[in-house]
Image (spheres, rainbow, N blue to C red):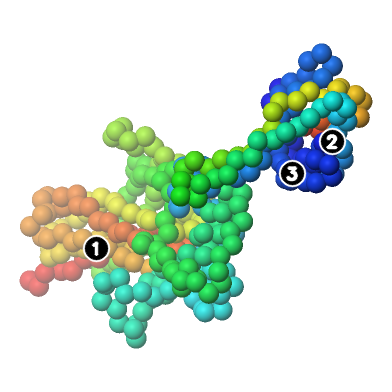
Amino acid sequence: MNQLLINGVAVGLSPDTALLPSFKASDLLKPDTIQSDYSPEVSVPGTSHNHQLLGQAA
Amino acid sequence: MPYKSLANVTLLSEGVEIMPRARLILKGYEGGNYQLQLVAGNKRFVEALGDKKLSELDFSRFTHARTLDNIAQRATTAWAEANGWFYELLDRGKPLDLQSVSPYDLWPTLSARLVLEQLATEAGFVVEYPYNGPLLKMLMPAVEPARYNEAFIKACQLRVGLGPDHYDDGAPDSNRSDVVKTIPFDDYTRDIGTVTPISPTIPGIYDPATYAFVADQVMQVQVEARTVVQLVYSSIHLGKAQARVELHVNGKRVVEGAASVEMSDFEDGVTNPFSVSVNADRLLKAGDRLTAVLCLAAWARPQ
C-alpha cells in the first residue's frame, strides 16, 4: 500500500496503484556516474482533489 | 501540462518513507488520469555549477568603493573572521618600504572557505566539512587589483574635443602674467572621423559650458587631457615658452604635464604647434569636479 505526499498532503491514488521505485547506489569511486532513484510511470485519477494538488505544478 | 514538476514529495510504503524529498514529474494528462513519475537522489555538483568561473561568483554583498577608509576598515583580523576576506599586504615581488606603504598596495584576499561556500550556495548545495581541517587556513590572494569590466568602461567612456575659435588674445605683450585657463573641451565631435565620438551613458556628467566632468558616484577615472598650443608673438625676444596641462579636482591641482618650445621654433612670431598632455588614474567621490587647466609661461632670453 503506497502513499504519495506532496508537501505532506496525500495524492488520491487508485487502489490498485503500486509504486515500486528503483533504487540506485552511486559508486563513490566513479563520481562521473552518480545515480538517481526513480519510480516507474504511474497513472493517478484526475479527481478534484488531485487537480488541486497537482495543479500547483510549476 | 507535460513535464511539470513538484518538489518536496514523499513516497511511503506501508507507512514507511522510501523516497523522501523526491521530485514528482507530471508527464501528462490523458483519459482522465495524470501520468506521474518520481525521481530522487543525488545530482552532480559539477553539473549544477555549470560553466561558471570563479570570477563570476556573486560577491556583490561585499561591494564597496576602494577608498582609504574602506580599505582600513576591511584590513583587520576581525573583518577577515566575520566576512571571509580582507585587504592584505603581500610581498608580490615589488620592493616594499613598510614605513611608507600605500593603502592601495593592499589587495583583497579571499579565504578558500568563502569561495567554496559561495560555489555551493550558487549550485544549490550546502557544504559541510570539518572545522579544523586545512581548508580553513587556505587563502586566495588577488593577483591584480579589481578593475571595471570592459563593457562598463566602454559605456562610461567620454571623449570630448576642442571646438573651433579658442584663442586667448593677450593684448599686452610684455610683463604679462602667466596665462591660466580651463581647457575649453566643448566639442563631442571630432574632425578626423576615424573614431566615433563617445559620450557617457549618464547625461549631464560632462558640462561643455564649464568644461567640467562631475562624478555622479564614486568612481575610479582614467584621464588623458591633451591639447595643441600655438603661440603668437608680436616680437620674438622671448627665449622659451612653456605650456603645462594640469588636472584639477574641485579646483585643486592633482597632477600636471608640461611641454616647452624654444626660440628656434619661432618663425614670423608664430611657434610651431606643439602638444602638451597629462595622464591620471584617480579616485573621485560623488560630486567631485574634474577640469583640465592650461598654464602658459614664457621666459625672455638675456639680451
The residue at the point 33 percent across, 54 percent down is B224
**B228 vs B68, nearest the viewer:** B68
In the displayed structure, would residue B96 be above or below residue B223?
below
- Kind of residue at badge 3: Ile
Q: Residues within 10 Å of mark 3 (few under 14, many from 20)?
A: some
Which mark, residue B224?
none
Mark 2 to mark 3 CA distance (whole Å): 12 Å
Looking at the image, residue A34 sits to the left or right of residue B241; the answer is right
The residue at the point 80 percent across, 40 percent down is B13
Label 3: chain letter: B
**B116 vs B226, nearest the viewer:** B116
Residue B66: percent from left, percent from top: 48, 66
Please report whichever mark, 3 or 1, sits nearer to the chain's N-terminal start.
3
- Kind of residue at badge 1: Ala
Is residue B278 in view? yes
Residue at numbered disc 2: A1
Mark 3 to mark 1 CA distance (whole Å): 81 Å
Q: Are marks 3 and 1 in contact (CB under 8 Å)?
A: no
- Kind of residue at badge 2: Met
**B144 vs B259, nearest the viewer:** B144
